[in-house]
Amino acid sequence: MDRELVERAIAAASRAYAPYSRLLVGAALRMGSGTVVEGNNQENASFPAGICAERTALHHAMAMDPKGVVQCIAVAVPQVKGDAPVSPCGICRQALLEQETRQGAPLRVLLAASSGAVIEIERAADLLPLHFDASFLSK
Ligand code: THU
């Protein structure tokens, strides 16, 4: 199942819109229902308006199924060769953490390298130590 998710992320990367950075990033996540949702980076001539692959997939999934549980997300950048996968940016880590908190269940993260190596992170919170979250808003 993890391998299928990685393959879906690789496929999604090939459809990314990244004319400025030329870095084609793909993501695929699996919901508790079994549905797989893909995303890729969507850039803009006004650079900050672009969005990463992980959040494209995550926000689409939650728009379709707001009470859904995201069990796992795979991220792939096939053009980066070797054993080292590309790792989610800070904003995506924060977005994944928000979803993990919202669903009250672990959101696994798979970072896929072109060599086939996959780094598995058991929960999104592990990607963001000392994170900011809603608990600070109620103080
Ligand atoms: N990018 C992602 O899609 N995901 C990441 O985790 C890192 C960066 C995209 C954003 C931008 O379109 C391009 O990669 C270069 O930063």
Image: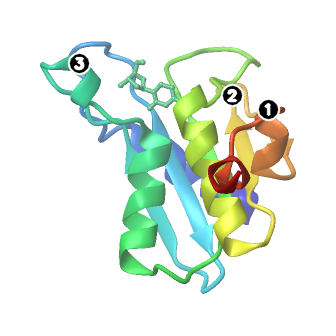
Tag 2 or tag 3, which sits nearer the N-term?
Answer: 3
Q: CA distance from mark 1 to mark 2?
A: 5 Å
38 vs 79: above or below: below
Q: Is residue 82 left or right of residue 26?
A: right
Q: Which mark is residue 22?
A: none
Disc 2 crowd, CA 10 A, few/some/many (<14, 14-19, 20+): many
Q: Residue at x 70, y 61 (%)?
A: 100
**At label 1, which amino acid type do we have?**
Ala
Which color mode does the image show?
rainbow
Disc 1 crowd, CA 10 A, few/some/many (<14, 14-19, 20+): some
56 vs 18: above or below: below
Identify the residue under disc 1. 117
Q: Position of residue 58 (x, y in %)?
A: 48, 57
**At label 2, which amino acid type do we have?**
Ala
Tag 3 or tag 1, which sits nearer the N-term?
Answer: 3
Q: Secondary structure at mark 3?
A: helix
Q: Is residue 98 left or right of residue 129?
A: left
**At label 3, which amino acid type do we have?**
Phe
Are the two marked residues, 1 and 2, in contact with CB atoms closer than 8 angstroms? yes
Q: Residue at x 62, y 51 (%)?
A: 137
Most foreground residue, 23 or 45: 45
Q: Quadrant of residue 134?
A: bottom right
Comparing labels 1 and 3, the label whose residue is closer to the camera: 3
